[in-house]
């Protein structure tokens, strides 16, 4: 019996520490990257929607703040400059412009959300607004099942 216990202890020590860690910020992030961070429950990020106000009001990523491109730098002053910021616009070009403006204004951690709202809807990301209500799934706060689902989607 003692021999079996020693074998188990040795096996545990030989295995690497597989503690899951949340994904980090990428300069160009996919909708999956952002969704992974949200599913981890990371509160230290801000999502900025730089589309026009009508588009934002019709529907946006849940929790996103409206920040039209023409008022972006002034409006973003309420956000900590070292906070992780995900930005998306109506087009990838608009998203790139917004990210450039934020970086020029001194924001350090800016990620461009590739594909914007369309990419977010394609992966069933939570949205809000009269035309875009997609509540989080019933397992939205179950990190293990959400990570397994995310891995399956990424492999496709």
Image (tube, rainbow, N blue to C red):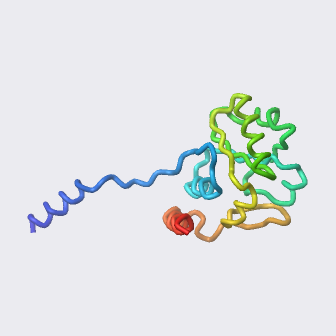
In the image, residue 102 sits, relative to residue 34, either above or below, namely above
Residue at the (15%, 64%) spot, across then down: 5
- As drawn, the residue found furthest toward the front would be 93
- Image height of 125 relative to 102, above or below: below
Q: Is 140 drawn above or below residue 23 in the view shown?
A: below
* Number of numbered labels in the structure image: 0
- The answer to whether 53 appears left or right of 116 in the picture is right
Q: Is residue 120 left or right of residue 148?
A: right
Residue 122 image position (x, y, % from top left): 70, 66
User: Image quarter for residue 102?
Assistant: top right
Q: Quadrant of the C terminus?
A: bottom right
102 vs 47, nearest the viewer: 102
Quarter of the figure with the N terminus: bottom left
Q: Residue at x 19, y 58 (%)?
A: 9
In this orientation, which residue lies closer to the viewer: 8 or 33? 33
Front-most of residues 5 and 13? 13
**Which residue is pictured at 71% across the width and 67% down the height?**
135
Residue 62 percent across, percent down from the top left: 73, 57
Find the residue positioned furthest to the bottom: 138
For the point 33% across and 52% down, the residue is: 17
Residue 48 image offset from top left, x and y in percent: 75, 46
Residue 140 can be seen in this image: yes
Q: Is residue 142 visible?
A: no
């Amino acid at each position: 019996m003692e021999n079996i216990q020693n074998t188990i202890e040795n096996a545990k020590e030989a295995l690497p520490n597989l503690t899951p860690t949340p994904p980090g910020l990428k300069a160009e992030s996919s909708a999956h990257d952002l969704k992974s961070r949200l599913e981890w429950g990371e509160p230290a990020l801000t999502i900025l929607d730089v589309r026009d106000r009508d588009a934002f009001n019709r529907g946006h990523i849940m929790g996103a703040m409206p920040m039209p491109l023409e008022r972006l730098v002034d409006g973003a002053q309420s956000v900590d400059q070292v906070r992780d910021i995900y930005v998306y616009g109506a087009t990838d070009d608009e998203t790139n412009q917004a990210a450039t403006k934020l970086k020029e204004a001194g924001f350090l951690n800016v990620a461009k959300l590739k594909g914007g709202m369309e990419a977010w809807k394609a992966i069933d990301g939570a949205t809000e607004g009269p035309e875009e209500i997609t509540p989080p799934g019933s397992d939205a706060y179950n990190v293990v099942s959400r990570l397994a689902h995310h891995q399956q989607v990424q492999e496709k």
